[in-house]
Amino acid sequence: MQVNSKIYIAGHRGMVGSAIHRKLQQEGFTNFVLRTSAELDLRSQQAVADFFVAEKPEYVFLAAAKVGGILANNTYRGEFLYDNLMIQNNVIHSAYTNGVKKLMFLGSSCIYPKMAPQPLKEEYLLTGELEPTNEPYAIAKIAGIKLCDAYRSQYGCDFISVMPTNLYGPNDNYDLKNSHVLPALIRKFHEAKQNNEPSVVMWGTGTPKREFLHADDLADACFFLMQNYSDSGLVNVGVGDDIAIKDLALMVQKVVGYEGAIEHDLSKPDGTPRKLMNVDKLHSLGWKHRIELEEGLKAVYEEFKTKHA
């Protein structure tokens, strides 16, 4: 990519897309084509086709998706499968028909089988059954990876796939019904502190382990891979280390400065027992994360307080 290359970031207002946008701006890129979901419905094949014909972007970061935590994934199963399939099919196909030089498709660690060996290697894709609660989202993302590979194989498209681990960072979703575990915990502890509540309730046992990557680190990895990686399959992006949800809760509690108790709602699901990414492939290419979890949490909480005072 040249600094004046025309770059389309699908999902530029989301946590991932906005981080990629910030990173590219820091690197001197200026020629962006951006559309909000109100301006361009990526589920509409005609709208996406017209957009690509009119704008002719040279590089595409496909970070737009319908996303959510366990509850949202399990409740809106039809929407999660349909919307995500339509978004990625339309963007990937129009990128091909309009001669996009390179496209990066962003997926999720939930593509791996529920009981896959840990840490998760790229080759474990499609070797077992998925976690039932987020199966629709996972199936859509797997289809996206395979579509990129198929267009590479059949048409010679330089389309690559990147699978980030659990993310956190600026522009995260703090809605308690639809958010992921880390932003939900930040909001719960913050509100409990504000309201002098004696305890905070967290879902499940707290024993599942999760890996967390700051969105700015992901954006840095995406920029690196867009410049240095061009192959089929996928690349895991993570930190290569994980933390039990209970320990995460204790870390958030400390960062927020909440002094009450933590209770467990055992009627709520735990989800997958562990989802640690193997990042050997990424490390071998020459990239490694920089932002450690507690440091990242402190920065995120400061930002959260300015928006949710």
Image: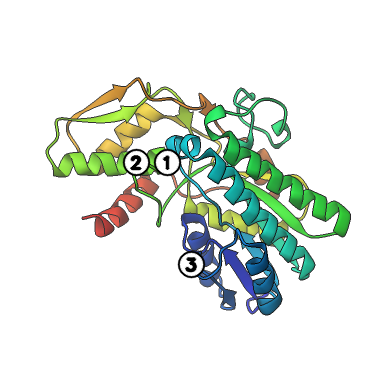
Would you say 275 lies left or right of 113 here? Answer: left
Q: Amino acid at mark 2?
A: Ala
* Measured Cα–Cα span from mark 1 to mark 2: 6 Å
Dot 3: few (<14), some (14–19), or many (≥20) neighbours within 10 Å?
few
- The residue furthest right is 154
Relative to 55, residue 66 above or below: above
Discs 3, 1 touching: Cβ within 8 Å? no
In the picture, the quarter occupied by the C terminus is bottom left
Mark found first going from the N terminus, 3 or 1: 3
In the picture, the quarter occupied by the N terminus is bottom right
Q: Position of residue 35 (x, y in %)?
A: 53, 70
Mark whose residue sits in front, 3 or 1: 3
Q: Position of residue 16 (x, y in %)?
A: 51, 56
Which residue is at 12% across, 38% downward?
196
Q: Is residue 240 visible?
A: yes
Would you say 250 lies left or right of 83 here? Answer: left
Q: Which mark is residue 184?
A: 2
Q: Amino acid at mark 1?
A: His
Quarter of the rendering containing residue 131: top right
Q: Which mark is residue 38?
A: 3
Discs 1, 2 touching: Cβ within 8 Å? yes
Mark found first going from the N terminus, 2 or 3: 3
Q: Secondary structure at mark 2?
A: helix
* Measured Cα–Cα span from mark 3 to mark 1: 24 Å
Q: Which mark is residue 180?
A: 1
* Measured Cα–Cα span from mark 2 to mark 3: 26 Å
